[in-house]
Image: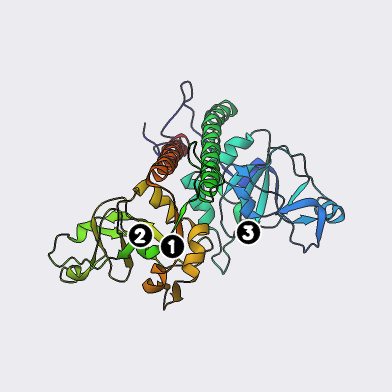
Amino acid sequence: MSKGTRNVPALRFKGFSDAWEKRKLIDQLSLLKDGTHGTHKDGNFAFLLSAKNVIQDSIVFDDSDRKISEDDFNDIYANYHIKKNDVLLTIVGTIGRVALFPRLTVPVAFQRSVAILRTKPTLFPYFLALELQTPTIQSKIKARANMSAQAGIYLGDLKKVVISIPKSEEQIEIAMSLNRLTNLIAATQGKLDNLEKIKRALLKHLFDQSMRFRGYSDPWEKRKFGELYKPNKERNESAEFSSENTLSIATMTVNRKGNGAAKTSLLKYKVIRIGDIAFEGHTSKKFAFGRFVLNDVADGIMSPRFTCLRPIHRQIIQFWKQYIHYEPILRPILIRSTKLGTMMNELVVPDLLKQNIRVPSINEQKLIGKSLSRVDDLIAATQSKLSSLETLKKALLQGLFI
C-alpha cells in the first residue's frame, strides 16, 4: 500500500502495519516553552546558549560562549527545570534545527531562540526529535514562521502543528535504528574534524620548517617571485578551448556549462594550464587580501578579469597547490602587492614579482606535497562517506515517517 493511501509511512519495520494517529503537537507535550526573553549581565556561572549552539542532533558550545550569574540562572529556571532528553528546537533565525538535551556537567540556559519540548509518556523523545527533522514537519514549521527581519515562529503557532505518531513499540524501533545511524554520522564527522586538524597542524609545521623530514636540514632558499613565475599572457585566440573548458577560479573546477560568455568573447579569455596559478581577489576573514589558487584540474580558459601566472621552471604541483594557497606565508606578500579594486582586491604584478618567498628543494617539495596529498585524500574519502550517510538518513527520515 503506497504512502498517503492511509496514514502510514512508505517504509515499515516487520511486524508493524497499523495506521499512525494524527495529533496536535501540544497534545503530546507536558511542557512547551522558549528560553529566556530577559536581558542578563555577563557572569561566570552558567552558559547562556542560543540557536547557533543547536546543531542538528547535538549542542555545541565552549568557553567562548557567554555566561550569566547564578542569580540570573535561578531566575530563568524559577518555574521549571530543563531535563535530559528534552527536545530542543530552534525557532528564531535559523528555524528547525533539533537536538536532545544531553546530560551535562555544567549549568546551561537558553535564550528565546530555542524552544524546549518535553514529551508525555506516550511519545518517545527521540522519535519526536527525528520527526521534527522530516521534510513534512520542517515545511509545516517554516510555513507558520513569520518572515520579518529575523524569521521566527511563535509557540502559539508551533503547538498547532500536526504530527503523526505510531504505537510506542514502533516509535522505539524507528528511533533506535536511526540513533545508530546518527551515532555513525557523528563519529564520521569527528574523524573528519580530526583529519582537518591534522592537516592544519601539518601545514603550519611543514611550512614554518619547525617540522622537517629526515635528511633535510638546510634552510629553504629565498627566491624572488619573479624567478618562479611570469605573467601568463596566453589567450584562447585559436579557439583551442570552448565554453565547456571554462574554469571557475574560486573553486578551481571545470564549469561545463560555461559562464554565459559569447563564443566570440571566449577568444579573448586567458588560457590557464595545469600548474598555472590564478589570483582570486575576493577578501574574507580567512583571506584578508585575496588568494592564489593553483590549477591542478585541467587545461582550460578563465575570465580575463583574473590575473594568471605561469611557473618558469618545473614545479611539484602537490606542493605548490598547498604552499601558494597558505595564508600565513602569502599574507605578507599580498599586503605589499595588492591594491583595492572596485569589487575585489587587484594584484599588482610588478610588485608581486619583487617579493621574496622561501622555497625548499625539489625533493623536499615532493615529500611535503605527497604527505599533504595523502591527508587530502583521507579527508575527501571521509567527507564522501559522511555525505553518503547523511543522504541515507535523509532518505530514511522521508521513508520511515509520514
Q: Position of residue 166 (x, y in %)?
A: 54, 32
Quickly name the residue at label 3.
154
Q: Residue furthest right?
A: 71
Q: Residue furthest front?
A: 218
Pointers 2 and 3 in contact (CB under 8 A)?
A: no
Q: Position of residue 198 (x, y in %)?
A: 54, 41
Observer-nearest of 284 and 179: 284
**168 shown above or below 90:** above
Q: What amino acid is found at the position of numbered circle 1 in the picture?
A: Arg
As helix, strand or loop, the secondary structure at mark 3 comes to loop
Left or right side of 322 for 169: right
Please tell me which of labels 2 and 3 falls first in the chain: 3
Left or right side of 4 for 212: right
The picture quadrant where one finds residue 129 is top right
Q: Position of residue 42 (x, y in %)?
A: 80, 60
The residue lying at 60 percent from left, 36 percent from top is: 126
Q: Indicate how the structure is coloured in the image.
A: rainbow
As helix, strand or loop, the secondary structure at mark 2 comes to helix
The span from disc 3 to disc 1 (Cα, nearest Å) is 44 Å
The residue lying at 56 percent from left, 38 percent from top is: 190
Observer-nearest of 266 and 323: 323
Q: What amino acid is found at the position of numbered circle 2 in the picture?
A: Leu
The residue lying at 59 percent from left, 39 percent from top is: 128
**211 shown above or below 47:** above
The residue lying at 54 percent from left, 49 percent from top is: 204
Please tell me which of labels 3 and 1 falls first in the chain: 3
Quickly name the residue at label 2.
228
Q: What amino acid is found at the position of numbered circle 3 in the picture?
A: Tyr
Please give the label number shown on residue 291: 1
Pointers 3 and 1 in contact (CB under 8 A)?
A: no
Please tell me which of labels 2 and 1 falls first in the chain: 2
